[in-house]
Image: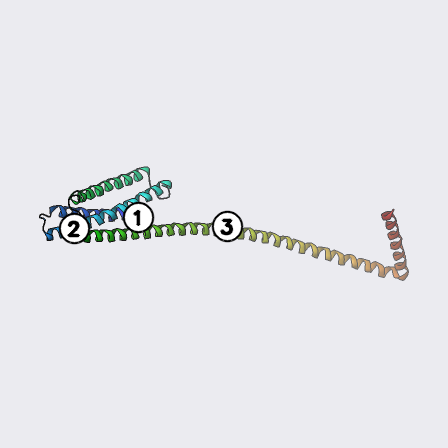
Amino acid sequence: MDPFNIVKADVQESLSKAQADLLSWQRIKGRGAAANADRGKLSDAVEGECKSIGWQLEELGKAVDAAEKNAARFNLTQADLASRRRWIMETNREVDRMMNALRAPQQAAPPSPTRKLNSAIHEENESFIGEQHSTQQQMMRQQDEDLDQLGESVSRIGHLGLTIHEELQQQGTMLDELDEDVDGTTARLQAAQKRINHVLAKAGMKGQLLIILFLIVVLAVLMMFAFS
């Protein structure tokens, strides 16, 4: 399910509760201690809900801005993005309306110390929750970036491994061909050695001496040409 719709449903539920509390707050009559206590509790509840909704709407706005930069990835159209922005704007207006309704009577009667303390504690809690949420979002984005970089590194290593494998196969083929050439040359040398031995054996001692003398003469001639 789309995370936006999950948060949207939560916001709408909180908004409905805040609207119901505001209606109950407006219906309280009288100025006695009990009425003031009930009015203060409902006012605190509505104000807390409105601040929580406002923070969630701010985060949704950031999410929509981020999604617009890569709408294809999130399978969103411009109409979808416009609809989400319109809903965020309308909800913000409703939150502002409820907050203004609460502030109107507060101008005539300042809040009690207890209410101030409760409001300060609530604001501090909301601020802490918001900071923790932002930190978690930042950590998740950093983890996503790290995973993307790791995936790219693994892909590069895979391509390098394939290249090395192909190079080893080529070198193995070249070594096989070299072995075949060496074997052929060895066989030819052995055959030539056999023929030479056969010629020497057939020529006898005298013939061998003549062959050696002839080879010495040829060597001397070659050396004369080489050093002249």
Q: Disc 1 vs disc 3: which is toward the camera?
A: 1
Q: Tell me the distance, in whole angstroms, between the alpha carbons under discs 1 and 3.
A: 33 Å
Q: Which residue is mark 2?
A: 40
- In the image shown, does 114 or 207 lie closer to the viewer? 114
Q: Quadrant of residue 193?
A: bottom right
Across and down, in percent, residue 20 comes to: 16, 47
Q: Amino acid at mark 3?
A: Arg
Q: Are marks 2 and 1 in contact (CB under 8 Å)?
A: no
The residue shown at (58%, 51%) is 167
Task: Decide: few, some or many residues near mark 3? Use Cα within 10 Å; few <14, some 14-19, many ≥20.
Answer: few
Q: How are the residues colored?
A: rainbow
Q: Which residue is mark 3?
A: 156
Across and down, in percent, residue 34 comes to: 11, 53
Q: Which residue is mark 1?
A: 3
Q: Earlier in the sequence, mark 2 or mark 1?
A: 1
Depicted 71 relative to depicted 126: above or below: above
- In the image shown, does 165 or 99 lie closer to the viewer? 99
The residue shown at (71%, 55%) is 184
Q: Is residue 2 visible?
A: no
Q: Give the number of the disc on residue 180.
A: none
Q: Is residue 199 visible?
A: yes
Across and down, in percent, residue 33 comes to: 11, 53
